[in-house]
Amino acid sequence: MRILLVLLGCLTILAGCEKSSTGQALGILERDRITFSATANEIIRELPVKEGTHVTVGQILVQLDNKNQLAVLAQAKAEYAKTNAQLLRLSNGERPEDIAAAQAVLEQADASLIANDKSYRRINKLFQQGLASSAEIERQLANKDIAIAAYHAAKETLAKLTAGARLEDIAAAQAALAATQAQVTLQQQKLDELTIIATRNGILDSLPYNIGERVPMGALVAVIQTGLAPYARVYIPASSRLKFMIGQQASVHVDGVDPPFQGIVRWIATDPAFTPYYALTEDERSRLMYLAEIELPDSAQYLPAGIPAQVDLTK
């Protein structure tokens, strides 16, 4: 009987503890963490900011070696200049000097054709009079045909120079120029990424590598804790889940700080953090927990992350 009374007393105490423990949601203070990774397998040349320092957007955190990328960028710019010059040449057409030279060649071919035609007529007249052989007239006829072909070739060359480049050639040159421009933009972006800058205001929490170390591509090189004040990350029991809505106020108790802070609920998980509801009995479903984040006011900015915090479940 005495043992039974002791067990009943213990159960009563445990029940009382469980009832009182449901009055607050437990958790810790946290800050958003922004991580920065190395975009290339390069050596760290500069670390201008020390750990624990407040940083602002655009401030340089880590400078990786950029000599190789500068060379690649210079090569891409040279290729762009080459393709741009080719497009300008096609667009502007031939030089006046080249056109004038082709015109002179055409005039020379025309004069040669006239001279060979006259010679052919004279030899042909002599041949009809029996004063010239058939070999001479055949030779003069061949010279006339050569002169005619040279005239037509010179005429076509001049027409090609004055007509300009084909539309298809210009379009191909424009496409090549666009491709080289895209390559320059890409290589410039890679160069810029070797200078790792802060993308949000906060505190530089960690610099895992030292100056002179070669970091592998994708390695974590800097971590920033953002936000002026931390937020409380707590677990809300399922029985109190419907009492919490995004945007409402909540009292946050921080160990060692009095009075409590009045925070704003900024996020609540839609799924339970522990065992899914379908794996529990009806009596056990009250043990489900939903993760929530309570944003603290600016007056809590001095609080570090990791301190235990509790949120009142009743208003």
Image (cartoon, rainbow, N blue to C red):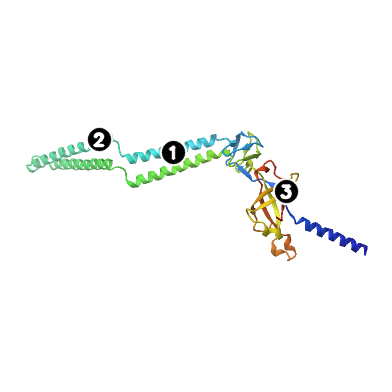
In which image quadrant can residue 204 be found? top right
Bin the neighbour count of mark 2 within 10 Å (Cα to Cα): few under 14, some 14-19, many 20 and up.
few
Residue type marked 2: Ala
- Disc ID at residue 100: 2
Residue type marked 3: His
Q: Is 5 displayed left or right of 116 in the figure? A: right
In which image quadrant can residue 163 be found? top left
Helix, strand or loop under label 2: helix
Which residue corresponds to mark 1? Answer: 79
Residue type marked 1: Glu
| Residue at x 25% of width, y 40% of height | 158
**Residue lying farthest to the bottom in this orientation:** 282
Helix, strand or loop under label 1: helix
Q: Where is residue 63 in the image (x, y as percent from the top left)?
A: 58, 35
| Residue at x 42% of width, y 44% of height | 178
Mark found first going from the N terminus, 1 or 2: 1
Gap in angstroms between the C-alphas marked 3 and 2 = 92 Å
Q: Position of residue 252 (x, y in %)?
A: 70, 49
- Disc ID at residue 253: 3
The C terminus lies in quadrant: bottom right
Mark found first going from the N terminus, 3 or 1: 1
